[in-house]
Amino acid sequence: MDKYIDIDMGKEINRRKLENMICDFLKTQATCVIATCSDSIPRASTVEFFPAGLTIYIMTEGGRKVENIKKNPRVSVALSAPFIGWESLKGLQISGTAEIGKKGSAIFEEGVKAYKKRRGLKKISMPDFMNVLKIIPTEIDYIDTTLEKKGYQIRQTISFL
């Protein structure tokens, strides 16, 4: 489906435009919360992330989130702009799949590239124990209350299934 229609308003947001809006928003934020779950025990961790288009990368030493992802790669990621008021609320939730990359893997290199780009670095050295999480979206819910003034629904959804 290439367009997303607000049934109440009748306006359309072209998928490409919506994806660009989401990419622009991702560039303005530095942290997100990643939620993982295994053995019926959920875990939510605040982490720094590095976007590459609609894919996000997270550098991590490991821990519970990595162990959970090994057992259950389905994740949810949430991020929002600082709350100023309801008239300018902006955020998104990503449902997706996480892949783990160790040093030397393609995923690790993709994550390092996103890290360097965001930080404006040409070269970095990462310890061998670092992991890169690659979050591949299956669905993104984007909320932007300023869209209402433009005649759009404030919640827009992109599905990649």
Image (cartoon, rainbow, N blue to C red):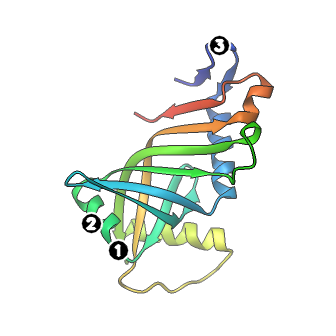
**Looking at the image, which residue sits at the far left?**
39
How many numbered markers are drawn?
3
Against 86, is 53 above or below? below
Q: Position of residue 130 (x, y in %)?
A: 39, 79
Q: Position of residue 10 (x, y in %)?
A: 68, 13
- In the rendered structure, which disc, 3 or 2, sits on the residue that comes first in sequence? 3
Q: Position of residue 14 (x, y in %)?
A: 65, 27
Which quarter of the figure has residue 115? bottom right
- Left or right, 106 with respect to 6, comes to left
Q: Which residue is mark 3?
A: 8
Residue at image point 29% right, 54% down = 37
Dot 3: within a 10 Å radius of its alpha carbon, few (fewer than 14), some, or many (20 or more) residues? few
C-alpha gap between disc 1 and disc 2:
8 Å
- Residue 134, numbered circle: none
C-alpha gap between disc 3 and disc 2:
43 Å
- Give 155 or 58, whichever is nearer the viewer: 155
